[in-house]
Image (tube, coloured by chain):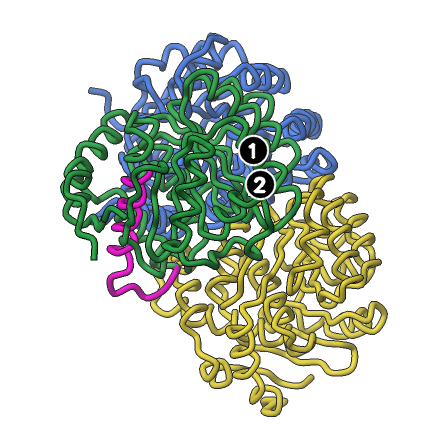
Chain colours: A blue, B green, C yellow
């Protein structure tokens, strides 16, 4: 069994301190289901959310944002225009950006949109196993937004995708995988109740964007976000009466976790 | 006073077991206000929600969904296209679908949209008394999304509408009515706090879709959903400090209710 | 130090009674992030929310609403059409309306939209200090949705803007300012946790609309809403474990506050 990567874990407190000091302005073009939950998760983590998604302003705003998060959960024709334009503007302005290819395998519209977005070189792509498989293979995989595959099995696919796209790939599941194609971490934080509410995956992606916006390096930003959300899920699940209470306690935990808690609770191994 | 319909009530546990075993993929084209609440209610009840509402993908997705829920709470021109297209695709593919004609009496746009949707033969229509009256008569009724009439008084209107449209009609209120034009049930579960939060009616409609997606027959699916939501409301209301807490506890209760609880708590009589 | 304005404070109970008796139908064209939270806040306060924002129906509905709330948090081209049309219809029909110029300084699209909306003569404009400054000066101010300036310092700007536009101006912050250009009140209710969740400012604006819809005069309506939301925030913050719990308790408090509580807790001074 691989042992904890103490070198990385020891850097987690300073990453969270940097996020809370910088209070990065994170632009979100995200789905209609989780917009409120995502904005509150960003606030709780220490970032400043800006849900700016109209084609008329998304690109203009991307140039002044600390980072950009693009989530395709509920695409529309105008939102695709906004996403592609904002991603291009972010790339041009050197603003890091994260792609969440929600349910990309489910429809042609989603696959085509993700193909366009990949051309704008996301800094990080965050999905569940079936989504990352669908991005890597271009083939329909998974029936919807739920994770089907075991994340640990897709580590090889993720590493290859990271190399090919020059992005960091983060795959969430029972055990998360983060890779840039060279270094690969497995993160064992989290709790099954995170899958009992909508938006926990989208919150991870947004918080990845928050660490990026605070100028934490991509591989470390992705891993730090997964550890933070994972520990928040573990705390929220303690004696929890159900998914309604879990969502509330998850927000409380995100805000309460200290930089030191992050290092103390992290379960990160090098694959 | 009519007595409990024990024959039907005894079938409720197997209906809920079927829902949780099947974990049906319920496509929702619903309103912007309740999208998060509806997705979480579906997860808590045991279904897998998919909020797929863009015209570019809604029809494609309807063919692979277990069921479709259409809710007109916040219509837009593109969402009307998506609704009509998805309903037609569902009908063609034999996928059952539910219509929630939110505030149909309030504007011309809503009345015209509902007229189009009725042509696609919804399996079930779920509304409050004023909405079902407006659907039945085509006349403006009610000023907004609140229920005005007493549901029990609209049982005759609902039964006639069920016969005319060949749909099951579910009317929610202090006492709910479910009818296919031949069999009519009155359901006395629920709590006034359900009307103190937004989205409880929309959650009922979505959970009707979940039972349909698990291949429970339409009349039984509608009644089972009303009983489940009603009992969840009763539980959530116990010693409840207010509407914020009620919404949280309602989700907890939806997830905690067992098949046996459903039969034990049901208050269903034959009208 | 100025002393409490007892004359005004003594009118607060009747204002809240009027709101709860009238149960005004408040039309909201608001942003996608806070729609659910706003609808629930209106219900908790005692109003009847109607989230009607499609261009096809917004103007028609504005003529039958008790009041209209326009919030530019997530503009789109169709929503701008709906906003301008509904504001014009409200003005024509004598329906009072409130403008919330969210993050108006952030993009050209927002500045241009607010300029159009001001032509339709809002009854009240509610924003944070940077937003009101941006409205008053037409110049970019603030980087996003967060408040930057101290509200008390913008009292003069607000009073001048009120005179110029013939609107009541409400500026929220650590201390709120409400002015019609002649009478100016400072309101010291509230709690820092209100800025730890998304949508508290939008809820204030909507509740301003609720008081207006109950035919409370504009200056008093704005001040009553700020006091109500401020006291609800103070109550919700007691022994509060974090922002998730705060949002839940805030709703509970909004519903529980009595007319007498409002007068007892108000901290309103004449500037």
Q: Is residue C180 left or right of residue C236?
A: right
- To which chain does the residue with label 1 belong? A
Are the two marked residues, 2 and 1, in contact with CB atoms closer than 8 angstroms? yes
Relative to residue C235, is residue B4 depicted above or below?
Answer: above
Determine if residue A57 is in view: yes
Q: Is residue A198 left or right of residue B238?
A: right
The Cα atoms of the two marked residues, 2 and 1, are separated by 7 Å
Question: Residue B220: percent from the left, percent from the top?
Answer: 28, 35
Determine if residue A5 is in view: no
Q: Residue at x 71, y 33 (%)?
A: A55
Q: Residue at x 33, y 55 (%)?
A: B175
Between A12 and C239, which is closer to the camera in this rendering? C239
According to the picture, the residue beneath numbered tag 1 turns out to be: A69
According to the picture, the residue beneath numbered tag 2 turns out to be: A26
The stretch in magenta equals B222-243
Q: Secondary structure at mark 2?
A: strand
Q: Main secondary structure of the magenta part?
A: helix
Q: Would residue B236 be counted in the magenta stretch? A: yes
């Amino acid at each position: 069994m691989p042992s904890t990567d103490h070198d990385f874990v020891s850097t987690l407190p300073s990453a969270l301190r940097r996020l809370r000091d910088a209070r990065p302005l994170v632009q979100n073009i995200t789905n209609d289901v989780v917009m409120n939950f995502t904005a509150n998760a960003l606030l709780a983590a220490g970032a400043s959310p800006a849900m700016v998604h109209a084609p008329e302003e998304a690109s203009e705003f991307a140039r002044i944002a600390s980072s950009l998060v693009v989530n395709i959960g509920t695409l529309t024709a105008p939102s695709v225009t906004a996403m592609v334009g904002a991603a291009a503007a972010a790339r041009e302005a050197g603003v890091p950006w994260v792609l969440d290819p929600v349910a990309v395998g489910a429809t042609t519209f989603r696959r085509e949109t993700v193909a366009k977005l990949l051309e704008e070189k996301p800094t990080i792509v965050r999905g569940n196993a079936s989504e990352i498989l669908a991005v890597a293979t271009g083939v329909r995989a998974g029936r919807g937004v739920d994770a089907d595959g075991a994340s640990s099995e897709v580590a090889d696919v993720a590493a290859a995708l990271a190399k090919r796209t020059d992005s960091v790939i983060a795959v969430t599941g029972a055990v998360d995988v983060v890779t840039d194609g060279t270094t690969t971490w497995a993160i064992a934080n989290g709790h099954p109740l995170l899958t009992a509410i909508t938006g926990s995956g989208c919150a991870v992606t947004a918080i990845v964007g928050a660490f990026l916006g605070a100028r934490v390096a991509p591989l470390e930003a992705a891993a730090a976000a997964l550890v933070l959300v994972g520990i928040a899920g573990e705390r929220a699940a303690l004696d929890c009466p159900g998914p309604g209470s879990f969502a509330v306690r998850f927000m409380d935990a995100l805000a309460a976790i200290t930089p030191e808690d992050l290092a103390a609770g992290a379960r990160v191994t090098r694959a």
